[in-house]
Image: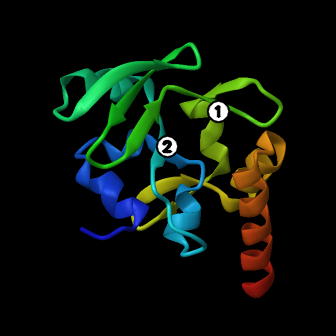
Amino acid sequence: MSDRPSDRVKALGISLGGVVVMGSGIMGELGIRESDDIDLMLEERVFEGLANHEGWRSIERDGREIFVHDEYKVEAWRSWVAPGGSLVDFAAILPQTVVIHDVRFATLEYVREWKQWYNRDKDIADVALIDEYVELNR
């Protein structure tokens, strides 16, 4: 299997119409840097269906239930912490997405804004990589 995030998401066998790849997934898809793990935001019906899909287990993270798929290094969320700290759901994030290789991703602009807001060391490094990518691809 390819290391492309879109191929890993497709291999999960879940409804692509109810999936948005969040975080650094788009960076891996565009070749900016490798994406070791993948964060997904799921439509509620898809999220609930993971309980019946092989390979997924439910855990609590940051006070919220998420599903984890260890083989594909994927975490699936029903809500996402947006820049500023509010929780957003699948429908709220859709306007800030783009489809690449048949899989929906949060836009590079959204990911940059989120990483600038979150401001961990790895996020600061990612903002610099995104800026370099954008400059080289104008």
| Residue positioned most to the front | 121
Residue 69 figure quarter: top left
Residue 92, label in figure: 1
What number is the disc on residue 39? 2
Q: Which of 52 and 115 is in front in this view?
A: 115
Q: How many labels does the image show?
A: 2
* Amino acid beneath label 2: Asp
Q: Residue at x 32, y 57 (%)?
A: 8
Residue 105 place in picture, x, y as percent: 54, 54
Query: Is 126 drawn above or below residue 111 in the view shown?
Result: below
Q: Residue furthest top?
A: 63
Can I make out residue 22 in this image? yes
Number of residues whose C-alpha sits closer than 10 Å to that of mark 1, classed few (under 14), some (14–19) or many (20 or more): few
Relative horizontal placement of residue 1, taking residue 120 as reference (left or right): left
Q: Nearer the viewer, residue 21 or 125?
A: 125
Q: Where is residue 78 in the image (x, y as percent from the top left)?
A: 49, 26
Q: Is residue 120 left or right of residue 33?
A: right
Q: Tag 2, which secondary structure?
A: strand
Residue appearing at x 65%, y 27% in the figure: 88
Report the residue at 46% width, 49% height from top.
38
Q: In which quarter of the image is the N terminus?
A: bottom left
- Residue 41 percent coordinates (x, y): 50, 36
Classify residue 11 by image quadrant.
Answer: bottom left
Where 19 falls versus 56 (above or below)?
A: below
**Is residue 103 placed above or below 135 in the rendered structure?**
above
Query: Mark 2 against mark 1, which lies toward the viewer?
Result: 2
